[in-house]
Image: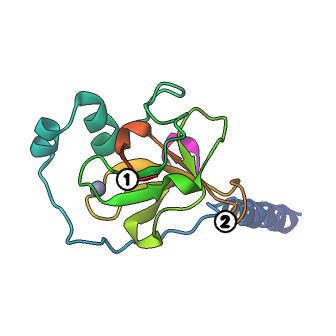
Amino acid sequence: MKFGIAVAVLVALATGLLILFKVGPEIEERKGVPVESRIEVADAEWKKKLTPEQYRVTRKKGTERAFTGEYWNTKTDGVFNCVCCGQPLFDAKTKFESGTGWPSFWQPIDDNNVSLIQDNSLFTRRTEVICSRCDAHLGHVFPDGPAPTHKRYCINSVSLKLEERPGK
Ligand SMILES: [Zn+2]
């Protein structure tokens, strides 16, 4: 009888673990290779260089309020660079209307220009997106974007600086 209970508990535990692994992030971690050499700047230097909101989001993994950022609704053509180090991150041609209030892209300008890291904060499992050159926090990537990648890079406006494409 006791043996039966022990088996039942073990089976329940194993099932729980299996479910836990199943709901892991659907987007794998990936370390990008920056275009130019990496930038290592002391936290105090970033604080001096950036506005308080840029610093809070990019260096302290903050999130800007939805529908308040500079670029959530912009349709201007160009390239979105990292606000901290200037590395190109996203092309306006891959920007789409997600309805979330944050600029959303279906792919980075190059997979190497960002790094993807598992983020278990806030009791959820998400995949964080950071700049591969200076580690600036950019936002998160979710597996519910449009074709062709079906990914949604949900990025804070304040982490980006739009460089308009010259000549039209
Ligand atoms: Zn950067």
Q: Nearer the viewer, residue 38 or 148?
A: 148
Q: Residue at x 51, y 50 (%)?
A: 140
- Front one among 48 and 12: 48
Q: Earlier in the sequence, mark 1 or mark 2?
A: 2
Q: Quadrant of residue 79?
A: bottom left
Element type at mark 2? loop
Which span is picked out in magenta?
A: 121-127
Residue marked by disc 2: 149
Percent of width and height locating residue 52 = 24, 29
Q: Is residue 62 magenta?
A: no
The residue identified by callout 1 is 166
In this orientation, does residue 163 appear?
yes
3D distance between C-alphas at marks 1 and 2: 27 Å
Q: Is residue 33 above or below residue 113?
A: below
Circle 1 packing at 10 Å, graded few (<14), some (14-19), many (20+), is: few
In the displayed structure, does residue 51 sit left or right of residue 91? left
